[in-house]
Structures are given as structure tokens and as C-alpha cells.
Image (cartoon, helix red, strand yellow):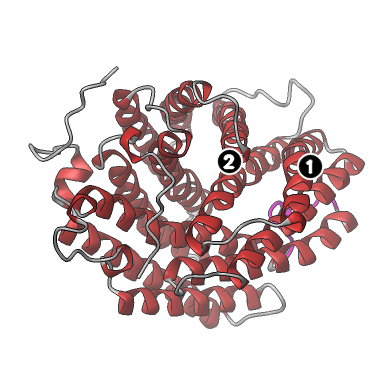
């Protein structure tokens, strides 16, 4: 069983195929990124940078694009500015990303600026479309404010990314007196802490209360106030300090970011403990994310204070990077386990409620597959995190990476089967844009 929220305006959402297409493509990029990442981990592919971009710019950001395109209109009660732009944003990002990854793996660095420009055009199309949508929803609540911050971070990170691609062909930063590795860490900081985590924070404040049927109390409100002020400022300070190589600035940003994320984890954890609904895959994955983020903050803050300019500790020293990846990954997968079935349920079954027997939201996916992917992902993550604590034999590292890949594959299969069984369109029709006659008419195309 699952909660069906009754306080959101689903009448303003875009056609079902638009967000589902983003989620399907994102899951495909996750699968490819998992293979490339495993290849880089075991040494048979020179694909560390390519794998990171497939996972972050690909799976995470494409999923975020689909989720924000769906739920900003729903949460804000306003129409999406342009459905046509929502379609083009995905095409441009995917073409640019695949071109970037292909150029990197092939060693044709001269093609990186071209691919990067196409990717930037896609992300900017998304930022413009969602920015115009948010502009009509003033005044902003806490979620909308975080989304606006994330869009601003996205513009900044894509500018830095394109400049780094150009720097391979025509030196840019040497003339400015900036070290390229420092700019790379600033770019990565804005991407992960600025775009990804800011979006997740804004969304999870809405989702965790909606789907645990709880309310924030005074302590939760105080923690959210701390985060709302210090997190975006801390992220900017952390990124700027890394670019210019200033240890005191980085330390200030590190304190703000780590304490803010610990506050978010505390707020979410309190709601999970007080939940009034049956446990679900979404809540299980949020629980792992809470533990991972709290452990990340405790592990990373001392390391960042001790050596703030360490280039190999951009996301946390040692196991810190794996802890952060676990926090982000489990939140995104947990959210997908509700968003995908909810979109389908609302469009396919909600009008039949009260007239005939209809499945609940959590009945749409296979709970045995959900349990299997959860077990594989937790085991794989634990092995890789353990590797950061000390020397882990290469075979065990390969086992951990393989378990993650198996877990990802099972999760993709489960969600794809959910769409195949219950969505009015075929998987191919959704993925390619051939939505067919069953698609809701796009009467407000702009």
C-alpha cells in the first residue's frame, strides 16, 4: 500500500511521456555509466571521467530534469512554461553527453568543446524553461527556493565545464593565473553540492513529509532554517575557495556544507522514525541515504579542515566519496520507486478509483525485485566504503562494483517492467517520443 497525496495539483502537470522519457533515458545512462565505471575501477577502461559524467550529468541530472519538469508544475500549481522545450532539453543533453563520453574514450579531445556546447545548450534550455515556470509561482516556498538555487548553480557549472573542455584545445586558465586542477575541483563542487544536492534537499523536504504522513516540528524548522541560509552560501564559498586555492575560504565553506547536510539528514531521519505509513522501498532507500550522509559529514569535515586543498578529496577523503555517492544514489533510486509508479497510477488508475478495483501505487512494481536490488546495492556500497578505510584486495573491489552493477540492472528492470505493464504507451514509444494516440493532447505547446 502507498499514500496517495491529496494536496497537489496534478492538472497542471505535463504529459506523462515527458518525465517518463527522462527517467528511462536516465536509467539507460546509469547502466552504461555502471559498465564504464566498473571498467575504470578494474583498469580495463580509461573511463573514470567518462563514467563520472555518465552518472552525474547523465543519470542523476537527467533524472532531476524529468522530476523537476513533472513536479514543479504540480507543487507550484502553475503550467510548465513550454512542453516543446522540455522535449528538446533531453535531446540536446543526451547528444552532447554521448559525444563528450565518446570523444573522451576515443582520446579525441578536440571534439570535447563541440560536445560540451551541445550539452550546455540542453542544460540551459532546461534552466530557462524551469526558471520561467518558477517565476510564475512567486512567492517561493522552501522547495521552490532550492530549485531556483539549483538552476543558478547549473548555469555556473556548465559554463565552467565548457571552459574546461575548451582549455584542452586552447589554454584558458593558464593566462588567468589559475591552475586547471583547481578549476576542475570547483566545477565538481558546483555540480555535486550545488546542482544535485540542492535539488535533492528541496525535493526531499516535500517528499519525506508527504509520504511518511508526518509534519515538521520546531526542531525540524530550526534545522531547516540553518540549512536554508548556510548551505547555498557554503557551497559557493567552498567552490570559490577551491578555484582560487584559498585554504581559509575552503575551510569556511566546508563547515557550512557539512553541518548543513548533517542537518538535512537529521530532519529526514526524524520523519522516517515517526512515519505513519507502511514501509516501502522509497523509505528504505531514504534510510540508507540518511545514514550515509551523517557518516559522510562526520568523516569529511575533519579531513577537509586538516587538508582543505587536497585534490583527491573533492567529495570527501577515503570512504567519504563513496558515502556521498551512496547518499545521492539511494535518494534518487528511492524517489524513482515512487515517482514512476505515481505518475503512471495517477494517469492510468486515479479516475477509476471508487468505480472498480485498482492497484495501489506500490503494487505496480515487483517488491521481490526491489528487495533484491536493495540487497545488492547495500552490499556493493559497503564493500567499496570498506575499501576506503584500508587496503581492499582488488578482487573484493571488483565484487563490490559488480554487485552495484547487478543492483542497478535489477532496479532498471523493475522500473522498466512497471512502465511496460501499466503505462498506456510502450517503452519504445516513450523513449523515442512516438507517444501515439493515447498521449494527452499537447494543447498548450509553446
- Secondary structure at badge 1 equals helix
Q: The magenta stretch spans which residues?
A: 308-318
On screen, residue 325 above or below 156: below
Task: Name the residue at the right extreme.
Answer: 248
Give whichever of discs 1 and 2 has the lower sequence position: 2
What is the x, y in percent for residue 423? 18, 53
- Secondary structure at badge 2 equals helix
List the residue tagged with mark 2. Answer: 143
Quarter that holds the N terminus: bottom left
Task: Name the residue at the left extreme.
Answer: 437
Query: In the visual, does 231 lie left or right of 66?
Result: right
| Circle nearer the viewer, 1 or 2 | 2
List the residue tagged with mark 1. Answer: 230
Instruction: Give 42 or 439, whichever is nearer the viewer.
Output: 439
Residue 419: quadrant of the picture: bottom left
Q: Residue at x 55, y 57 (%)?
A: 209
Binning the other alpha carbons within 10 Å of mark 2 as few (below 14), some (14 to 19) or many (20 upward) gives: many
The answer to whether residue 58 is visible is: yes
On screen, residue 290 above or below 82: below
Q: Residue at x 41, y 27 (%)?
A: 118
Q: Are marks 1 and 2 in contact (CB under 8 Å)?
A: no
On screen, residue 260 above or below 290: above
Instruction: Give 247 or 431, whichever is nearer the viewer.
Output: 431
Quarter that holds the C terminus: top left
What is the x, y in percent for residue 225? 76, 45
Amino acid at each position: 500500500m502507498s499514500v496517495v497525496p491529496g494536496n497537489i495539483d496534478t492538472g497542471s502537470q505535463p504529459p506523462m511521456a515527458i518525465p517518463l522519457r527522462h527517467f528511462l533515458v536516465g536509467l539507460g545512462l546509469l547502466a552504461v555509466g555502471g559498465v564504464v565505471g566498473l571498467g575504470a575501477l578494474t583498469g580495463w577502461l580509461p573511463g573514470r571521467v567518462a563514467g563520472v559524467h555518465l552518472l552525474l550529468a547523465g543519470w542523476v541530472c537527467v533524472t532531476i530534469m524529468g522530476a523537476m519538469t513533472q513536479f514543479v508544475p504540480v507543487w507550484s500549481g502553475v503550467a510548465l512554461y513550454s512542453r516543446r522545450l522540455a522535449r528538446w532539453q533531453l535531446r540536446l543533453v543526451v547528444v552532447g553527453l554521448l559525444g563528450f563520453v565518446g570523444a573522451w574514450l576515443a582520446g579525441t579531445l578536440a571534439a570535447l568543446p563541440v560536445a560540451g556546447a551541445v550539452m550546455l545548450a540542453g542544460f540551459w534550455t532546461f534552466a530557462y524553461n524551469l526558471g520561467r515556470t518558477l517565476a510564475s509561482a512567486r512567492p517561493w516556498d522552501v522547495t521552490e527556493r532550492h530549485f531556483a538555487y539549483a538552476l543558478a548553480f547549473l548555469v555556473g557549472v556548465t559554463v565552467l565545464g565548457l571552459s574546461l573542455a575548451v582549455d584542452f584545445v586552447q589554454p584558458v586558465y593558464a593566462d588567468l593565473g589559475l591552475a586547471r586542477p583547481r578549476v576542475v575541483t570547483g566545477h565538481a563542487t558546483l555540480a555535486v553540492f550545488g546542482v544535485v544536492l540542492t535539488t535533492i534537499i528541496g525535493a526531499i523536504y516535500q517528499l519525506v513529509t508527504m509520504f511518511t504522513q508526518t509534519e515538521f516540528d520546531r526542531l525540524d524548522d530550526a534545522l531547516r532554517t540553518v540549512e536554508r541560509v548556510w548551505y547555498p552560501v557554503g557551497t559557493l564559498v567552498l567552490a570559490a575557495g577551491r578555484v582560487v586555492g584559498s585554504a581559509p575560504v575552503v575551510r569556511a565553506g566546508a563547515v557550512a556544507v557539512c553541518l548543513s547536510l548533517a542537518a538535512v539528514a537529521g530532519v529526514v531521519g526524524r520523519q522516517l522514525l515517526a512515519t505513519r505509513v507502511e514501509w516501502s522501498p522509497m523509505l528504505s532507500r531514504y534510510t540508507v541515504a540518511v545514514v550515509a550522509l551523517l557518516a559522510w559529514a562526520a568523516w569529511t569535515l575533519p579531513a577537509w579542515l586538516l587538508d582543505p586543498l587536497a585534490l583527491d578529496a573533492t567529495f570527501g577523503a577515503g570512504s567519504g566519496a563513496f558515502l556521498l555517492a551512496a547518499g545521492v544514489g539511494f535518494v534518487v533510486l528511492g524517489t524513482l520507486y515512487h515517482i514512476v509508479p505515481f505518475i503512471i497510477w495517477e494517469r492510468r488508475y486515479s479516475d477509476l478509483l471508487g468505480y472498480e478495483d485498482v492497484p495501489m501505487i506500490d503494487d505496480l512494481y515487483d517488491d521481490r525485485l526491489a528487495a533484491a536490488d536493495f540487497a545488492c546495492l547495500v552490499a556493493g556500497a559497503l564493500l567499496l566504503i570498506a575499501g576506503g578505510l584500508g587496503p581492499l584486495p582488488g578482487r573484493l573491489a571488483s565484487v563490490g562494483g559488480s554487485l552495484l552493477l547487478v543492483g542497478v540492472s535489477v532496479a532498471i528492470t523493475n522500473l522498466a517492467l512497471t512502465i511496460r505493464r501499466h503505462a498506456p504507451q510502450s517503452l519504445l514509444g516513450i523513449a523515442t517520443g512516438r507517444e501515439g494516440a493515447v498521449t494527452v493532447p499537447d494543447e498548450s505547446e509553446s
